Image (tube, rainbow, N blue to C red):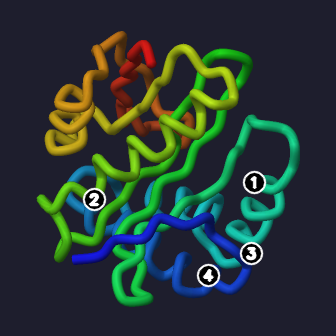
Amino acid sequence: MQITIKKATFEDVEELSKFLQRTYLAVYQDFLSKEYMSRAIEVNYTANQLKKAIIRGNDSDNFWIGYYLAVIKNKIVGVIGGGMTDELSGIYVLYVDENYNRLGIATQLVDFLTQKQKTLGAKKQYVKTLQDNLKGNQFCKKTGFKFRDTRLSAFNKENENFMINYYEREI
C-alpha cells in the first residue's frame, strides 16, 4: 500500500474539513460533550478555518508549520499538524481514518513532522491528548513521549472539567 505524505493545499480543504470533523467526532464522542466538540470543530476544522491555517502554514513564522496529509489513492487517510517556538516543537493534530489504523500511518506522520521540525532547529517536542483517550495516551508513550502533567482543557467552559495529558520528548 503506497502512502504519500504531502502538505495540505487549498485544493484539499473540503476533503480535509470532512476528514478532520469525522475523525475528531469518532475519537472523542465517548469522552466529550456535544457542545465541547462543536466548539472545537468550529474553531479548528471548518473549511474557512482550514484555509486560514493553510495560509499561516506558508508563512515564514514556524509557530504553525501546517497540515500534512497521508494519502492513499488520492484519499486522505491521516493528518498531522504542528509547529514550534524556538527549540520546542509541538504536534497539535494527529488523526488516522479508523479503517486504516494499525498500518503505521500515525507513526509515519509523526516521523515526517518530527524530521521537518528538527531541520528547523527543534530539540524537544510535545503533544497533548485527552486524559480519557487511552489509545492516544498509549500512542504517545509508544513513540517515546514521557508524561509531564495533566491540565484543564483550554476549550472548557464553566462546569466542564475535561483534562488534557501533556507529553514531551527530546528529538
Residue 57 circle label: 1
Which residue: 12% across, 59% down?
A: 102
Q: Earlier in the sequence, mark 4 or mark 2?
A: 4
Q: Badge 2 is on which residue?
A: 105
Amino acid at the residue labelled 2: Ile
Secondary element at tag 4: helix
Single out the mark in the foreground, 1 or 2. 2
Secondary element at tag 3: helix
Above or below for 106 versus 151: below
Separation of disc 1 and disc 2 at Cα? Answer: 22 Å
Amino acid at the residue labelled 1: Gly
Disc 4 + disc 2, Cβ < 8 Å = no
Bin the neighbour count of mark 4 within 10 Å (Cα to Cα): few under 14, some 14-19, many 20 and up: some
Report x, y in % for residue 48. Answer: 74, 75
Above or below for 163 versus 99: above
Q: Earlier in the sequence, mark 1 or mark 4?
A: 4
Q: Badge 4 is on which residue?
A: 12
Amino acid at the residue labelled 4: Asp
Q: Earlier in the sequence, mark 2 or mark 3?
A: 3
Q: Nearer the viewer, residue 68 or 17?
A: 68
Q: Earlier in the sequence, mark 4 or mark 3?
A: 4
Single out the mark in the foreground, 4 or 2. 2
Bin the neighbour count of mark 1 within 10 Å (Cα to Cα): few under 14, some 14-19, many 20 and up: many
Separation of disc 1 and disc 3 at Cα? Answer: 14 Å
Q: Badge 3 is on which residue?
A: 48
